Structure formats: structure tokens, C-alpha cells
Amino acid sequence: MIKLVIFDLDGTLANAYPAVYESVNHTLKVLGFPPSSHAEVKRSVGGGDRKLLIHYVGKKMGEQALAVYRPHHARTLKQKGAVTLMPGAGEILKFLKTKGCKLAIASNRPTKFTRIILRELGILKYFDAVLCADKAGRPKPAPDILQALMKRLKAGKDETVYVGDMTIDVKCGRRAGVRVAALATGSSYKKELKALKPWVVAGKITQLKKIIAEVS
């Protein structure tokens, strides 16, 4: 019986890549670095904004980059159309709540930005808990966030499914001992996800209806 479904955010439920791309390139311009492509930014996300920016500017300028990036990103996320729901995301959230599942968010994004996205998309109401790396010790792929959510929402490993789009999500779920539904909708390629042998790899989030129904 599946009692808890935990979701990653970017590339899983939300498409905020345009906003990240805009804020990254704004930061690079301010600091005198060449711009990055949308494809490179998309492949570089997932480890949190500090790790993302260090990838471009190096550790020594990491804090300086964050000071430029974060205020700009907070504004950009609130611009019309900057963040959209991934296809089928709203449908699957409604379906799972109808089934009585508890829902949670586990993201390496800072809490502030995660909540902005959830509010902008109108889906914050679906979640029983939202936990990000800045409030839960080690970031993914460490299992800390998932373990804390399972404890908070009183769900066992065999009662929990984690849904994410990146290889770090698969590694995180495996380390937490839960089933991982990997979606080939975000930053990692399908072949990369399959290589880690998660519980299931799906091309669309709506496929979770059938997958979860079969184990419930």
C-alpha cells in the first residue's frame, strides 16, 4: 500500500528552466563571465543554486554569485510564464489526493524559491510537507530529506514512492530504501536513469496512475 508519494520539483512537477537560465546568465553578465546555453543550464541544475553557480564561476566567487543570483531569481520566478507545470503534473496530484495519499516535496532548491514556485503554480495546497536541503542537512543524493519526510509523515520505506527526474534522485531514493519512479522529463537522459535501475522509468508523469494503482 502506497501511503506517501514524495516529488522532486524541477523537471518533475515544474518547468522553471527558463527562469533559471535567465538568472544564471544575468549573474554571469554582472560578474563578467560569458553566457551559458539553455541546454547547459538545464543539465547543470539539481544540486542546488550554490553548486550550480560554482559550476560557472568557481568556489572563490560562489558567494558573490549567489548574492547576485538570488534576488534576481526571486523576481524572475514571479514573472508571468516564467514557471509552468510539467504536462500532466496537476492531473497526477489530484489523482493521488483522491486516493488518499500523502504528498510531499523534496528539493535541493532553497525553501524560499521552492515555495514561490509552488504558490505561482497553485499547487502548494496539495502537499502535506515541503522540505528542502537548506532545512534538512545534506542535499540529495544523500537520503536526509526523504528520511525526514517519512518520519514526519509516518510512512515506512515500503509505503513510500519517490518521484524524480535526475540520476541524483534515483541515488537518493535508493539510499533511503524507497521505490523510485524516474521520469525522463527533466535534466537526465532516459538511458542515464535506466542505467541506475530504479523501480520504474516513465516518459510521462501520468503513467504514475497505473504504476501506483498496481501496488496499491
Image (tube, rainbow, N blue to C red):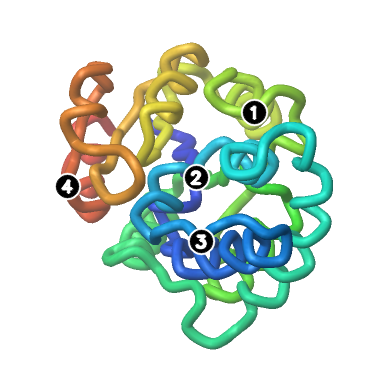
**Location of mark 4 (residue):** 203
Which amino acid is tagged 2?
Val
Quadrant in the picture for the C terminus = top left
Q: Contact, CB < 8 Å: mark 3 with mark 4?
A: no
Which secondary structure lies at badge 2?
A: loop
Residue 157 horizontal side relative to residue 180, left or right = right
Q: Position of residue 196 (x, y in %)?
A: 27, 17
Q: Earlier in the sequence, mark 2 or mark 3?
A: 3
**Location of mark 3 (residue):** 35
**Mark 1 and mark 2: Cα distance apart in space:** 13 Å
Which amino acid is tagged 4?
Gly
Quadrant in the picture for the N terminus = top left
Which secondary structure lies at badge 3?
A: loop
Q: Contact, CB < 8 Å: mark 1 with mark 2?
A: no
**Location of mark 1 (residue):** 139
Which secondary structure lies at badge 4?
A: loop
Q: Earlier in the sequence, mark 2 or mark 4?
A: 2
Which amino acid is tagged 3?
Pro
Q: Is residue 2 above or below residue 125?
A: above
Q: Earlier in the sequence, mark 1 or mark 2?
A: 2
